[in-house]
Image (tube, grey):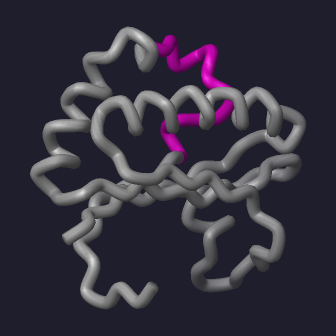
């Protein structure tokens, strides 16, 4: 059964194209490391919340947009192996100061599906 990595990240709105280019590179590396699918989605209809929300979760600042993304793997074992390969891949070696987002406010985690209707 598939396994998913999910991500939320606040991106400066003015850096959308820079982020998109990084996302395309990352998607290729994920695929090269065994991922089935990689999706990056720019917030279009994401309300601010008072108690909880995507913007609150990433401590969104003015001039930022929330990005929701996920990577689908064939299995958790494939994900564990693929992520180890990805982290060692020279294409993914970045200086945090050059990234088009604040990595300290990025949220991520691995998820096992409990319902999958296609």
Please tell me which residue is depicted at 48% across the width and 55% down the height of the picture. Answer: 7
Please tell me which residue is depicted at 76% across the width and 51% down the height of the picture. Answer: 61
Towards the viewer: 93 or 103: 93
| Position of residue 14 measured from the top left corner of the image (x, y, whole percent) | 89, 36
Total marks drawn? 0
- What segment carries the magenta color? 94-105
Side of 112 where 6 appears, left or right: right
Q: Does the magenta stretch include residue 13?
A: no
| Position of residue 15 measured from the top left corner of the image (x, y, whole percent) | 81, 33
Quadrant position of residue 73: bottom left
| Position of residue 23 measured from the top left corner of the image (x, y, whole percent) | 61, 36
Q: Does the magenta stretch include residue 99?
A: yes
Side of 100 where 36 appears, left or right: left
Towards the viewer: 64 or 78: 78
**Quadrant that contains the C terminus:** bottom left
**Quadrant that contains the N terminus:** bottom left
């Amino acid at each position: 059964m598939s396994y998913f990595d999910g991500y939320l990240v606040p991106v400066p709105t003015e850096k959308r194209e820079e982020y998109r280019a990084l996302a395309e590179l990352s998607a290729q590396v994920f695929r090269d490391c065994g991922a089935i699918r990689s999706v990056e989605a720019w917030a279009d209809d994401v309300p601010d919340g008072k108690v909880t929300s995507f913007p609150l979760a990433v401590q969104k600042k003015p001039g930022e947009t929330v990005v929701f993304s996920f990577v689908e793997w064939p299995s958790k074992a494939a994900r564990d192996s693929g992520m180890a390969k990805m982290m060692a891949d020279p294409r993914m070696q970045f200086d945090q100061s050059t990234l088009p987002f604040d990595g300290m406010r990025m949220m991520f985690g691995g998820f096992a599906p409990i319902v999958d209707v296609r």
